[in-house]
Amino acid sequence: MDDLFSEVLIKKKPTAGNIALKYLPVGAGVVCLLCGVLLHTVFLLPGAVLLILGIWLMPRQDIEYEYSYVNGALDIDCIYGKRSRKHKASYDLSQMEIMAPAGSPFLDGTAGLKNVDYTSGDAADSGSVYAVVIPHGGERQILLLQPSESMKKDLRMRMPSRVHL
């Protein structure tokens, strides 16, 4: 039995923009509501709208990527706030041209291709980031991933000439 199923969950490091979208609308909404109560009622409606927007945006800034790898097929989902899931893409890794660590000389000549980043974005994890050159949607892309050891070993076993570890 040579079937392999592997799931990897990667938590995305929040950026300054994510942090701002998480807290600024709530803070501005509270300030507007206070101004509406203390100064003039015209501030109540914008305050309520900002507060609702902030409450809706807050969990959407907590992002995790889930890779589901089954026998050469990779599905990527994005999980927002540990509650809602959105399917991002499916890839048939048998069509990949090359897989190598990001920044590797094996990737020379791939400048100008569209980068699709499904990594944590943390500089401390940069050694575990791999780039996959693969056709998707009619164009060649560079897919940035943080695969598990079992995924890397399985891909290396299936396509030894295209996978560089």
Image (tube, rainbow, N blue to C red):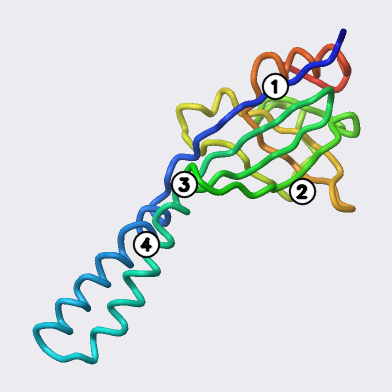
Q: Look at label 2 and name its amino acid.
A: Leu
Answer yes or no: do the residues labelled 4 and 2 have beta carbons within 8 Å? Answer: no
* Local secondary structure at mark 3: loop
Q: Which residue is mark 2?
A: 113
Label 4 and label 2: CA atoms lie apart by: 37 Å
Task: Tell me the mark number nearer the camera, choosing from 2 and 3.
Answer: 3
| Quadrant for the N terminus in the image | top right
Q: Quick one: which residue is furthest to the top in this view?
A: 1
Residue drawn 19% across and 73% down? 31
Q: Which residue is mark 1?
A: 6
Label 2 and label 1: CA atoms lie apart by: 28 Å
Q: Look at label 1 and name its amino acid.
A: Ser
Residue drawn 22% across and 70% down? 30
How many numbered tags mark residues here? 4
Q: Which residue is mark 3?
A: 81
Q: Earlier in the sequence, mark 4 or mark 2?
A: 4
Label 3 and label 1: CA atoms lie apart by: 22 Å
Q: Look at label 3 and name its amino acid.
A: Gly
Q: Earlier in the sequence, mark 3 or mark 1?
A: 1
